Structures are given as structure tokens and as C-alpha cells.
Amino acid sequence: MKLQSPMTVFFLTLLLACKGNNPVAPTPSPVSVTPPTSATTAPAVPKLVWSDEFDKAGLPDPAKWKYDVGGSGWGNNELQFYTDKRAENARVEDGKLIIEARKEDVQNNRYSSARLLTAGKQSWKYGRIEAFAKLPKGRGTWPAIWMLGDNIGTAGWPRCGELDIMEHVGYDQGVVHGTAHTEAYNHVKGTQKEGKTTVADVENKFHLYAIEWNDKQISFFVDDNRYYTVERSILGGTEDKWPFDQPFFLILNLAVGGNWGGLKGIDESIWPQRMEVDYVRVYQ
């Protein structure tokens, strides 16, 4: 992973604008930009190629999002049932996406929630992927902003690769995790490549969670502060170690309990809980 470059700060200063009365994203300090070395060759400035600003109230935009549905535990013994097109669990209001987990019986599950994804609609190979979000609070909450390889249907997990832009478990409030999973390096084996940082007010304020990803490295950021990097030269370049040279799709979800989220139990008194997302943007 690379350190945050002046060019990254420069294009964020130009393009990262808040909307209406929504919370204001961090504003980088002005920086100088090195002139191009050639009069005919200027450095490439990443462009906004996809976004959802969540400006239209109602259900999430069906042109951009679909739903994972079910209550099978999702490989982690989670307790929620993910619903389909149900405003109680996923809706846009006041310029923000709300993903809400509720304590209620739904098809033999004790909780309901939502899991939105762009699979089959949009995916990306390399770039900066970011989300400006506020997280839930309390034992049993497990929100995530993450990505899976497009080839998951044929390769399966973890060979498809997984990039966790942000994960947070409520029993460890304020500790944000960024992780890369591959066939060689994953949590089942206890070999996942993971960094973490502490953000004291994740449940009260919006923060910018992001990765910057290219063919050599992937960097993880909170509020444009890089806290972790994985590098191809260190992990290895074979598919089982670096499956990140293919398109990945995006997932937003709020799980309840599970092997990690429920490791220290669930506080039954805190529900409903929500993750709020002001926007999601992709630059390339």
C-alpha cells in the first residue's frame, strides 16, 4: 500500500463535497502539486466513475443495488434475516441510506436487517472506493462496508478474494478494522491480513472509510489517514495470495451477533440499531 499522496488529497479537495444539511466530510489542507515533467504528458487525475449520493427518499435505487436475502447464518452463525425491499430495514431518508437491524421474529430468526450489494450491476478493478458513514453502537452489532471478487460464483470464497473497507464490532466500540482475505490468508486459517485503528466517536459522527487499490498494493484509510497497507510483493502474486487483479463488487450490511459480532454476547436492550451512509463514491 502507498502512503497518501498529494494527488490523492488534491482530487479529494476538488470532488468530495457534502450535500445539503448532511454532515461535512473532512476537508484536507491545501497542498502543492508537482507540475508534469513533460509539456505533453500530465499526471492522471482520478475521476469519479460511480456514486450513490442517496438523494431520493424511499427504497435504495434498484438500478444500483440489489439485496442478499435470507437467514442462514451467512457462514458466521449470524442471527439476522436479511429482507428484500423492506423499508424498515433499508431506506433512504434525509439524504442518507439507513440500514437498520431490528429485534423481531422473521422466518425463525430473532432479528431483521439488510444487506445491499452491487453484484451484477456494477463492479470495479482498482481505484479509490469510499463511504461516508456513521456506525451503530452496542454489543451484537456488526456493520461492514466491503467487497468480493466477481468470480465468487465459480471460484467460491475465499479464492475470489475479499476486501473489508470497514468492519466494526460493537463489543469493541470505536475500533475499525480493514482486512484482505485470500485463499492463503483468511480468518478461517487465522492468517488474514488485517489492520485496525481507533476512532472514538464512530457512533456519533460520520467518518470517511476508504481503500486505494492498484495492481501492487491496497491501502486502508479513515478520514484520509492511512492506517494499513497490504502489498503484492509481500503477500505473493499467485491467485491464492493475490486475487485482486479482477473486478470486485461492493456490499453494505449490518449483521447481528455471529462468530465475531456476538463473541461477547448481544445486548438485547439496544435495538433497533442502524448504520447510516451519506454517500458511496468510486474514483478511477
Image (cartoon, rainbow, N blue to C red):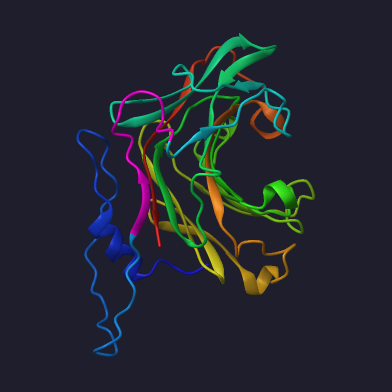
Q: Position of residue 160 (x, y in %)?
A: 69, 53
Q: Is residue 127 left or right of 18 when viewed as pictured? A: right
Residue under the image location 23 percent in, 59 percent down: 14
Residue under the image location 49 percent in, 16 percent down: 272
Q: Please say whether residue 176 is visible from this viewpoint.
A: no
Q: Is residue 56 left or right of 177 when viewed as pictured? A: left
Given residues 195 and 78, the one toward you in this image is 78
Check residue 55 for magenta coloring: yes
Residue under the image location 63 percent in, 70 percent down: 232
State whether residue 87 is above or below residue 26. Answer: above
Given residues 156 and 121, the one toward you in this image is 121
> How many marks are shown on the rendered structure?
0
State whether residue 131 is above or below residue 60. Answer: below
Q: Which residues are magenta?
A: 48-62
Residue under the image location 62 percent in, 12 percent down: 106
Q: Position of residue 64 (x, y in %)?
A: 43, 40
Going by the picture, which residue comes out furthest to the right? Answer: 189
